[in-house]
Amino acid sequence: MHQAVTFLARATAVIGGLVLLALVLLTTVSTLGRELGPGEINGNYEILEAGVAFAIFSFFPVCQLYGAHATVDIFTSALPPRFNRAIVAFWEVVLTAALILISWRLYEGMQRYIGNGETTFFLQFPVWWSYAASFAASVVTCVVGLYCAAVRVRGWAHDRDLLPTA
């Protein structure tokens, strides 16, 4: 199970990285076009907006898996390891619940845009496409989050770290 979740998280991060790289290239070409004469790429802001949203959601799973979210542990670093495991497990469950809520709202937003047929201004692609891409990445985040929450709780119960922590 751990290998499958790790593969899923890493694959999603790689896809997000490739999308981010493509967005950097798009922005560079558009900016050069604007400065050198031919003009900027039409609709580059629309593509950038949709792509960055997807990239953000695609990096959540790997961040979740490796416990790489930002933490402030100045007060808890002196506590016993078992107590710290309980704190990490608790916040893992809370974060997973928040991610599930965000995914649900993304799904509802996608359904709303599918229903009303709204498109972007310049490129005229349906707005729900960007919601669908972000929702797909958020579903992977939820799967990884549920796995991590279960493993962190189990690690606390068995008094050992089963997943890495930052």
Image (cartoon, grey):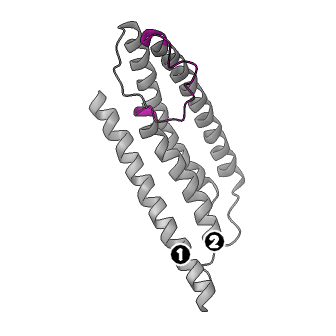
Over which residues does the magenta segment extend?
64-83
Name the residue at 39% across, 19% down: 151
Q: Which mark is residue 28?
A: 1
Nearer the observer, 128 or 139 = 139
| Residue at the farthest bottom position | 37
Closer to the camera: disc 2 or disc 1?
A: 1
Q: Is residue 105 visible?
A: yes
Task: Count residues near mark 1 (Cα–Cα under 10 Å), then give few for <14, some for 14-19, many for 20+.
Answer: few
Where is 98 relative to 9, above or below? above
Task: Count residues near mark 2 (Cα–Cα under 10 Å), then give few for <14, some for 14-19, many for 20+.
Answer: few
Name the residue at 54% across, 44% down: 135
Q: Three-letter amino acid code at disc 1? A: Thr
* Numbered disc 2: secondary structure: loop
- The residue identified by callout 2 is 123
Q: Is residue 79 magenta?
A: yes
Horizontal relation, residue 120 to residue 27: left or right:
right
Where is residue 152, by image quadrant? Answer: top left
Q: Is residue 10 magenta?
A: no
